[in-house]
Every structure is written in C-alpha cells, then in structure tokens.
Amino acid sequence: MASPQREPPRRLDSRKYSVMATPGREGQQIQAGVYAGRAIGVFTSGGDSQGMNSAVRAVVRMGSYLGCKTYYIKEGYQGMVDGGDNIVEATWASSSGIMQLGGTVIGSARCKDFREVEGRLRAAENLISRKIINLVVIGGDGSLTGANIFRQEWPSLLDKLFDAGRITKEQFDECSHLNIVGMVGSIDNDFCGTDMTIGTDTALHRIMESVDTISTTASSHQRAFVLEVMGRHCGYLALVGALATEADWVFIPEWPPEDGWEDHLCKKLSAERATGQRLNVILVAEGSIDRHGTPITANQVKDLLTDRLKYDTRVTVLGHVQRGGSPTAFDRILGARMGAEAVLALMDATPDTPACVISLDGNEAVRVPLMQCVERTKNVQNAMNERNFEEAVKLRGKSFQNNLATYRLLSKLQPPKKTADESSVGKRFAIMNIGAPACGMNAVVRSFVRLSLAQGYTVLGIHDSFDGLLYGRSTELINVESHHEEFAYVKPMSWTEVQGWSGRGGSLLGTRKVLASKYGIEKIAKKMKEYEISGLVIVGGFEAYHSALQLTEARKDYDSFCIPIIVIPCTISNNVPGSDFSLGADTALNEITDICDRIKQSATGTKRRIFVVETMGGYCGYLATMSGLAGGADAAYIFEDKFSITDLRDDVFHLKNKILNAGVQRGLVLRNEYANPHYTTDFIEQLFSEEGKGVFTCRKNVLGHMQQGGVPSVFDRNYGTKLAAKAVAWMAQQVKEYTQEDGKIFTNHPSTSTLLGMRRRHMEFTPLQELAEGTDFEHRLPEDQWWLKLRPLLRILAKHTEMDYIAETLPEGVVDLEELEF
C-alpha cells in the first residue's frame, strides 16, 4: 500500500535549537486490517506518569484495527530481557477499563541487564521469536535514547544471534530492521519538541489541589506553607503551579533568585501580612539552586521565615502524590491520540526512517526526530551547568518564558510606581463578562487588572454585563441614603481587590446571557461615552462574541465604539470562532470525565449496564466528543455529525457483542444536548433499554449545570492569565497608536475590534468582522472545528468496525443478536 500524501516537515519554532515536525495521519481515512500480519510491542519504562495506560490502550486498539498483533512487554526493558510471560499478546478486552487508572498497568522497571550487550541480545532474541520488529516505547528521554541505541545496534545483534545459532535464517531475513516510535511519559514536561508530555497536566492538578487545600488551613492559623514539588532539572511544575495558585514566591532551577533573595522574600511577605493577608504559599522545585549553584531546599526557606519573621511555617513535600491519582481528561486524550499516531508512524516506517517521537504541536499530533529532541533537551541542562540561566529559559521555549515573565509581574505586592509609557495617563480600560459563567473568567480579570495597572491604566470593572453598565450606579453617584446595598456596578478595580481570584469558579464580576442589541445599541454607546472608556475587553461565550460584533458594526453611527475592543472566549461549549480552545472547556471536560468515572463505578456490582449521558454544549459537540475520548465511550452523538436510527441500531448491536463476547460489563454512550430534536436522550435510553433486553440494562444521566461548576483547572487558570497578558499588551499598543491630539481614542479600523484566541500553538488576534464570515449564527457554531478530525478515533478505539460488519451480514429476518450463535 502506498504511503498517503502528507504535509512536508515544518519547524516547530524558530529558535536556535528548533526541531522539524512531520504532520501525522490524524483525521485521515484509515482502512481497517490493511497492515495484517505485522507485530507491535508496547512497553513503559522509567518513572510512571498518569495517562500511560490511555496510551497503551490506544496502541493495542489501533493495532487491532489495522490487523496487527500487539504484545504487552511487561516491566519495561527488564521484561524484554527476561521474556517468557513478560511478553504476552494483548487483546481488545485486556485493554478495557484501564484508561482511568494512574501509573502503568503493564509495569515499569529500571534494567541494568539491558545496558550490557548480552542483555540486549536476549531482548532481541525474545522479540524476534514473536516477530516483533515494531516497538512503541513510553518513557522519558533516557528510555527513548536507550531504544534508539537498541535500534542502531539491531543489525549487529542479529548477526551475533545468527552466528550463535540462536535464530534461523528465516528469522534473520524477516526481522532485518527494527522500527522505534516513542511517546514521552514524564510529569516534569522537560522534553523539548512537544508542548506537553503525558502526565504533566495531572501532576499540575495534584499540586493545585494540594495548594488549594492547604490554603484553607493556612489562612485559619495565619501560617506560611513551603511546598516542595518535583522538578530535579526542570521547574515547569513549580512555575505553572505558582501561576495557577497565586503563590507568593517560586524557586526553579532555570531561574535562580538574585543574591540577597532572603531579604527580598522576607520584605515581601512582611508587606503582605501588613495588608491583612493571612497566608503565604511558597513553591520550591526539588532541583532549585541559587546563582552560585548552591541548592535551595524547602527546609532552608522554612527556617528563614521562622527565624527572621517568626512566622508559623510548615513544610509539605508532595513527592509521589504528584505521580498518583486518576489522569485528567487532557492526559487521557493526549495518551489516546499519541498512542494511535505512534502505531501509524510504525506502519509508515521504512529501514531508513529515523526513530521518531510523537509530539503535541498546538492541537495536532506530529512526528519529530527523536534524537533532535534529545539533543535539544541536553542543551538545556548544559546551559544550566554553565550558569547560563537566560539561555536555559530560552531553550525551554516561548511558553516557559512567558510564564516566567507573567508570574514575576503578577506576584508583585503593588503595581510599579513608574509606568513604562506616559500615553497611559488618564486612559480607562473596561472589562466585563457576557454569557453563561465558566471557569477561567476570574483568572482573566485578575491578570488584566494587575497588568493594566502595572502600565498605568485605570481599569473599570463592569458588573452584571450590560445590566450593570446601563442601570448600575457610577462611583460618583452612590447615594448613601439609598435603601439598596451600597455598590458601584461600574467602578475602578484595585490591585489587592483581585487577590485570590484565579482559583475561584463562576464570575465574580457577574454575567448575563443576553446580546447587546436587546438593551439598545444607542443606550450602550451613551454609557460608554459617559464613563470615557478607552478600550473594552469582553470575556464570555458566543453572546460575548456576537455582542462585540454588534458594537463593531455600530461604529459608523457611534464614536464611543471607535475604541480597541477585544473578545476573550470563555465558555464550556468551546463554540466561539477564532480559537481552538475556549476558557472553561478544560474544567468542564474534567468534571464530565470525573462524573462518568463515578457513574461507571456505581455499577461495579451490577453486570451488563449501559449508561446514556447527556452533556451541555448547545449545538456544539466538543464536550461530548472529547469527554467520550477521555471516558472510553462507545459512541458520542452530536449535532455536527448527523446520525440516523440505523446508526443507533448498529450501536445496540455493538454493545451487545461487546458484552456477550468481549466480557465487558459496562458501556458508555454520550449525547450532546442539541444533537437531534427527535432522537432525544430519553428516546435513546428507551430504545437501548428495549433492544438490549436480556443482554443489558440502561440508565440515563443528564449532567446539567454540574459541568459549569467546580474549581478552575490549571489549564484554565494559566490560559486565562496569559490571554489577559496578551490582551493588555495589544490594548496598550492600540491606545498609543490611535490617541488623537485632544487625548481621545478613535479608531474604526476592522483590525481594532478583534477576538483573541489560541490557534494551533499561538495566540492570535482575528478581526470580528472577518470571523463573522465563517460563523453559523443560527446554531452558534464556527463553520470550521478542528476537533471533528478526532471523531474517527473515538469509533476506532471503541472497536466499531467489527460491529459494522456484523450488522451488514445479519441473516435475513434476524433483528436481535440473541438469535445469533457467537
């Protein structure tokens, strides 16, 4: 079979040590059984990380779909050397029920034997006996490097085995080369060449949960807590954890504190206590050092605070807590996508193809040369060893640099006394929320307020959307004799006012799910002119985008709209055009995934049960599809992917076969709330209940507003913070460019009314009027949605191919699988 046409390789970035990436085959049509007869081995090596099981499951099931034999190699390289029962054929059923488990179910171990030639000879002999010449290795850079060395030595190992009579001539010819594809399983996110490694997101969640929990007891007793997190050579966990939890100080290996940091730290904490702050949180990466290379430990920081400030200080070492627990939705989906792509990469490999690693580039799974990534990863450590910390930070990537710069500014006690530009004097930015509440809204407001104040701008917080703007009271008009609560609906926000907002769910500014046109464009224009707003930021969902578009289109009639306008998408539905991801969607996915886990667990003592779960999302099927991937669903019905009664019938057949033949006891079916006006959740539950009689029972669950609740995820906190930082920089630039001689702001250029979103791996501004051309306003959807390419993977991992075959070949008149002999 000829290799499919793919995009040419591209650079992941333009830095000195950039790596080349080749797009994968995700979303392409893949014929079932096309690689029949090939064998694949999969193993995990080095430290475990959450999400490894999802990757293993995907390797097994994609391999099965393609017709390959797949083998578990248990206990990593040690199992490969020992052979025997450590190398067993994997089945579809054996990979069931593992993706929600932490760690690795096939085991991982260090192996001294593999470092010796004889150990590698035994490993090669064990693989050749099963015709395994395609290996998927899931581990860190050491494990991946070892696999590449094994691949390079393979011809010489075959020669030695043949000369010693340990393999036959036929085996020698059939197994002449070894293909290697890697996936990085590491909670440290210390591997260059991928945006995120498997397990990092879950580890960040463990850190966030620990800090959030500790904060309540610390506040009660006015304590300081010093938390040691993992990161012997990489400070990613500590840095992003500090951003997400608003920690007072963070120590990381890549950016040691300046000399005299002890005095600065004590001064900062003392000033915070003077403002009434009752707790202090400091994160220390385990590999933290000072500028001279001397280690900085959590106990050292604790002793400093106890001796100098007399604070009641406690140390908490999170340790392997960060490696444990159920994987987040992100890590499950990441593992599934990487695992499936790894199998396809092996099938495409030739003897001349270099070993590659499957990486995440924005929203796309790509293939990058393994040793290029390893080399660049080593360059980071070399820079640190040479005390060239600025170079080390650069080599970590642009995202790491932005995280560090943003944290250093946001963690200040007060805004800088001197602003960078006098153009900010007298200028007012306004920020408001529109649409349903979603986690991440408050993180945006906190970051936007502080970074705007840092540049000398005044920030007006508009409470309760347009209700607050039109019918609230200005600060100057508060009537002390009013019978209503004294509250200004449009008022300047202060630096300390937004302390602690990042970790709060919902919308602390208040929000309404109404379009601007309902209130009257003229009224809104009048109020914006009254408050002398120089720039407007609207945080919210489709209503926020549509309302901002209405204001933009009214610029020709009202000068008060001729100011820079930014929309920051924030909705669990992820249905706003111009951005691959909306704030709040990640938190909602975690909530849905966690609930589905518990729903399935509730049936542990009940055999043969199918759950039909309805998710939110309006007409957008993002939540149903992605939570289906994360939860191992058998089907996910959505509006964008039309389905019929025949599809529902086939899924009944699929579930019956799965229960009768594969020994699986539970199934999960997801339905987006507006998937179909006729095939409702009630209808599907009743249909499955009737057609599944004698084989399974069926239960329905409508998740409702639980999906909007919860504590914001690390991604949503960090993403919201960085979006706001980008928005402030853009807004300041626009104000400087479009300030008139009289000091007023005027611009009606389309590019100054924009939406800020993430496309692939970059944050981009897109004019609202440009986005309108590709928007389905009736169904509140963008016409192009990247995640739809993952729909085939959902079906493949649920093993629907065989069911389609069975449904098509049923004997005439047979309508129930119970009438067939299995």
Image (tube, rainbow, N blue to C red):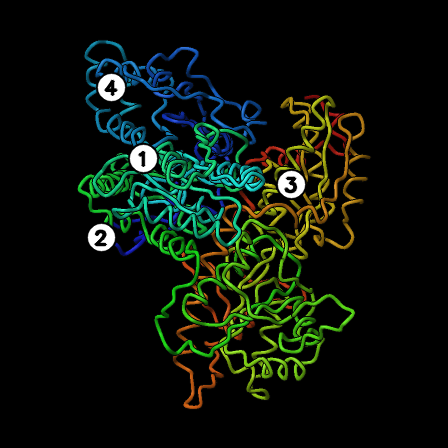
Image x and y of residue 224, in percent:
47, 39
| Residue receiving disc 2 | 16
Question: In the rendered view, would you say 593 is above or below 764?
Answer: above
Numbered mark located on residue 663 in the image: none
- The residue under the point 43% across, 28% down is 319
Query: Image check: 630 left or right of 451?
Result: right
Type of amino acid under label 3: Ala
The quarter of the picture where the C terminus appears is top right
What is the distance, in whole Å, between disc 1 and disc 4 at their CAs? Answer: 27 Å
Numbered mark located on residue 115 in the image: 4
User: Secondary structure beneath disc 1?
Assistant: loop
The quarter of the picture where the N terminus appears is top left
- The residue under the point 39% across, 74% down is 733
Q: Residue 769 versus residue 345: which sits nearer the camera?
A: 769
Query: Callout 2: few (<14), some (14-19), or many (20+) C-alpha neighbours within 10 Å?
Result: few
Q: Residue 611 versus residue 482: which sits nearer the camera?
A: 482
Is label 3 or label 2 in front? 2
| Residue receiving disc 1 | 287
What is the distance, in whole Å, between disc 1 and disc 3 at their CAs? Answer: 45 Å
